[in-house]
Amino acid sequence: MKPHWAERLRHAMHNQADALGNLLVEGFHYLALFAIGGAVAWAAGLTFFGMLERGQATIDDILLLFIYLELGAMVGIYFKTNHMPVRFLIYVAITALTRLLIADIQHNHKPNMGIVMVCGAILLLAMATLVVRYASTKFPSPPADVPGRIKAGDSTSLGDRS
């Protein structure tokens, strides 16, 4: 048997280390989110001002701005909810492939298997979006405030609950 004071000291040390670890992880998490959000805003601004400087906007530029919009929305949603919206990643991929397809058709003007493969990839991603949407409605995540459920960022294990 351990002395009672030693067990209390062990719990206090564990709680302090856990709190410090959570502070460091969440601090890095917010710092990284702000850095990613800033980089997306900066890149979108450079693209937009480049269009103004040239005096014209191409479909590539507009689709690139849509990619930046989706990335910015993804950062905002992740910042608010601590959940990565997988559908937004799929939307970014679809937009990027559409941009690639349009650029290829504009510059080459030749039908080839590359166009078919890019179209197939877009179709596959669209079907993945349907699967993700169906799965999220059929099997929704439990709400974050359910008692006994570990929330994202909560480092308390199920065995240590008292």
Image: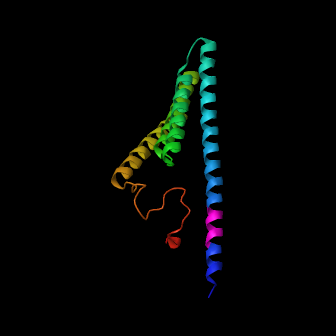
Does residue 125 appear in this view?
yes
**Visible residue check, residue 112:** no
Residue lying furthest front: 5
The magenta region covers 11-18
Residue nearest the observer in this picture, 31 or 98: 31
Q: Quadrant of the N terminus?
A: bottom right
Q: Position of residue 112 (x, y in %)?
A: 53, 32
Give the residue at the far left of this rendering.
138
Residue closest to the far bottom: 1
Residue 14 included in the magenta stretch of the image? yes
Res 139 → quadrant:
bottom left
**124 sits left or right of 109 in the view:** left
Which residue is depicted at the point 58% across and 24% down?
A: 108
Instruction: Confirm whether the magenta stretch covers residue 83.
Output: no
Residue pictured at 54% horizontal, 40% vertical = 75
* 35, 8: nearer the viewer: 8
